[in-house]
Image: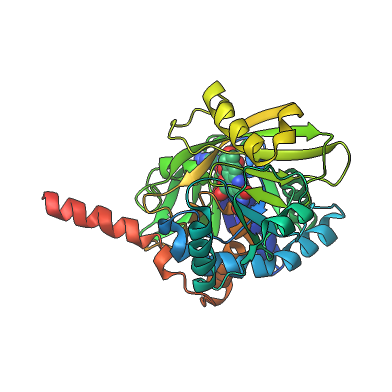
Amino acid sequence: MNTYDILIVGGGIIGSSIAFELSQRNLRVAVLDRQEFMREASWAAAGMLSPAPDCPAAIPLVPLGRASLALYAGFVAGIEEASSMRTGYCAGGAIETLCHGDAERELSTLVALHHGLGLACEPLPLDDALEMEPALGREVRAAALLPDEATVNTRRLTAALLAAAENAGVALMPGVEATALVRDGDRCTGVKTSVGKTFSAAHVVFAAGCWTGQIPEVASYAPTVPVRGQMAALIHGGKPIRRVLRSERGYIVPRDGANPQMVVVGSTLERAGYEKGVTSGGMEKILSAVNELVPELAGAEIVETWSGLRPGTPDQLPILGPTDINGLLIATGHYRNGILLAPATAKLIAEWITERRISSNWEEFSPLRFARETTDRSAGAS
Ligand SMILES: Cc1cc2nc3c(=O)[nH]c(=O)nc-3n(C[C@H](O)[C@H](O)[C@H](O)COP(=O)(O)OP(=O)(O)OC[C@H]3O[C@@H](n4cnc5c(N)ncnc54)[C@H](O)[C@@H]3O)c2cc1C
């Protein structure tokens, strides 16, 4: 029987987190993915849990990011308990460094911006920064400590989340691609799929990452675009790196405290269509940035390189919540923050489905903002 209370399209961190959250509310939940689960952006991510905005467009996202970070310890505890697996969650903080220009003035601006947004951020004298992170290079001219930031090992988290969802009774269906909506008047009642079966549900949630915008009838609510990011994993035997180190040009995320230690480094922001791939230019950009930050990494072994496609949106904000087709919801467009935003997204979508009540301000993320634009454009053209 292919009938469920909730049907989720897309088995990345967003779809799977929503499924796990809803399974705790005694609902029959199924997740479809056109390939193996967790093989796209969620697998590729560095795993920084940072609500700090990386550009002015990301400022409206800060309250949701802070709310999600506050949920994280409970989110991973629930997953670890249900899966008996570890997620590598570490609330160790991050150090933001400034290596160029008028670093002292930029540091004051950075600290003031963070405080204005309610984010903890302390200027860090360079001697203190070097004591905390002896591997930092001498090119660093100013630094700030972001004590509330955390990291998670995305490969472990995604594996544990899938096991937790399955143990909680979620039906996981790899190799099933959603190809179209099934509608009954103004209601969405399910999806048609590539395997010839139709799946029915009271609520259908599209969480298909950067591909959400490729699905007919869903595209007008979720005009997602892929934004490629390249990454590398390095093993080094130098001074241990204890927390996330970031500069204007790149970042280093420790994966363990072992010696030799594994770190992951990134990343690029590229409009390369749906082409994944690692390029010499991309690696050069990342490695020159991290070697400036921690010169000892120049001797590290590159053990893996990869890339992933972030789900970008026209206004760089996520697309969350119900559409004006009854029973159809969207949860995508998390761009650079989907790992951070998974707990808040799952809570918000589950609240909407089960209580028709939302405990946070989601309207600026509504899928209707794009559908209205499409309608306005067609009205203007006619
Ligand atoms: C290099 C890189 C570094 C990043 N670092 C961080 C970070 O440090 N912190 C952070 O918070 N975020 C980070 N991100 C962003 C984060 O990875 C994404 O925002 C997040 O993974 C998006 O999750 P998702 O579930 O929406 O999409 P995905 O993980 O891409 O999953 C979408 C799924 O939908 C499936 N699908 C697509 N179409 C269909 C269909 N028609 N039918 C069925 N299934 C379908 C796909 O196969 C896929 O499995 C990073 C991303 C990249 C690429």
Q: Find residue 378 and report its horizontal and vertical position in percent.
A: 18, 51
Question: Which of the 4 image quadrants contains residue 315?
Answer: bottom left
Q: Find residue 206 and report its horizontal and vertical position in percent.
A: 51, 52
Q: Find residue 349 and report its horizontal and vertical position in percent.
A: 55, 65
Furthest residue to the top?
Answer: 280
- Does 101 appear above or below 236? below
Is residue 340 something one can see in this rendering? yes
Q: Residue at x 49, y 39 (%)?
A: 269
Question: Which of the 4 image quadrants contains residue 234?
Answer: top right
- Does 1 appear above or below 309? below
- Does 325 appear above or below 382? below
* Of the pair 118 and 372, the residue shown nearer to us: 118
- The colouring scheme, among rainbow, by chain, secondary structure or one colour, is rainbow
Q: Residue at x 61, y 66 (%)?
A: 121
Q: Find residue 273 and report its horizontal and vertical position in percent.
A: 43, 31
Q: Is residue 49 left or right of residue 206?
A: right
